[in-house]
Amino acid sequence: KELAMSNVHGAGGIDETHGGLQKLYFVCFSNPARPPAELEANLEAHKAYLSKLEREGKLLAAGPLLGDDAKYDGTGLLVYRVSQRKEAEAIAQSDPFHAKGLRTYTLKPWQVNEGSFDVRLLFSERRFDLP
């Protein structure tokens, strides 16, 4: 069966050779391009930008990747809740780290077919748990 991935670059479908959810997201791998001190000086602007994306519903998840020793290795991973490459590019380029040339990035389309996500809401305590 021929793969139908035209939605990755514009309008169209996804890879329909797989079952399941068939939901398309974009994963952004972000790597340092400048010394840690320069990144640290811009960290709050980066975090504020991610909070904005989160409120807008465009950020599924973000955080550092860790090495085998469970320590930060410099690479960050962000999952954008968008299905168009142009929108993912605009989001990535607008991140203060990327816009200022402090980090470089690579975007990859990611089709989610399987998995689950649980959230436990405790109304009386006005909190939630992520099991």
Image (spheres, grey):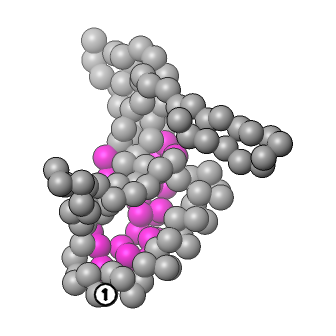
Quarter location, residue 76: bottom left
Q: Which quarter of the image is occupied by the N terminus?
A: top left
Q: In the picture shown, does residue 120 fall above or below 22?
A: below
Q: Position of residue 62 (x, y in %)?
A: 43, 55
Q: Is residue 9 visible?
A: no
- Magenta residues? 81-108
* Residue underneath mark 1: 38
Q: Position of residue 16 (x, y in %)?
A: 39, 19
* Amino acid identity at mark 1: Glu
Q: Residue at x 36, y 83 (%)?
A: 40
Q: Could you tell me how many numbered marks the image carries?
A: 1
Judge by depth and name the residue closer to the eye, 26 or 2: 26
Report whether 35 appears left or right of 18: left
Q: Residue at x 47, y 62 (%)?
A: 91
Residue at far right of view:
124
Q: Residue at x 56, y 52 (%)?
A: 58
Quarter location, residue 100: bottom left
Is 96 magenta? The answer is yes
Q: How many residues crowd around disc 1 within 10 Å: few (fewer than 14), some, or many (20 or more)? A: few
Judge by depth and name the residue closer to the eye, 11 or 100: 100
Q: Position of residue 18 (x, y in %)?
A: 36, 16
Q: In the picture shown, does residue 69 fall above or below 94?
A: above
Report whether 68 appears left or right of 125: left
Q: Position of residue 39 (x, y in %)?
A: 33, 81
Report whether 68 appears left or right of 128: left
In what element is the residue under mark 1?
Answer: helix
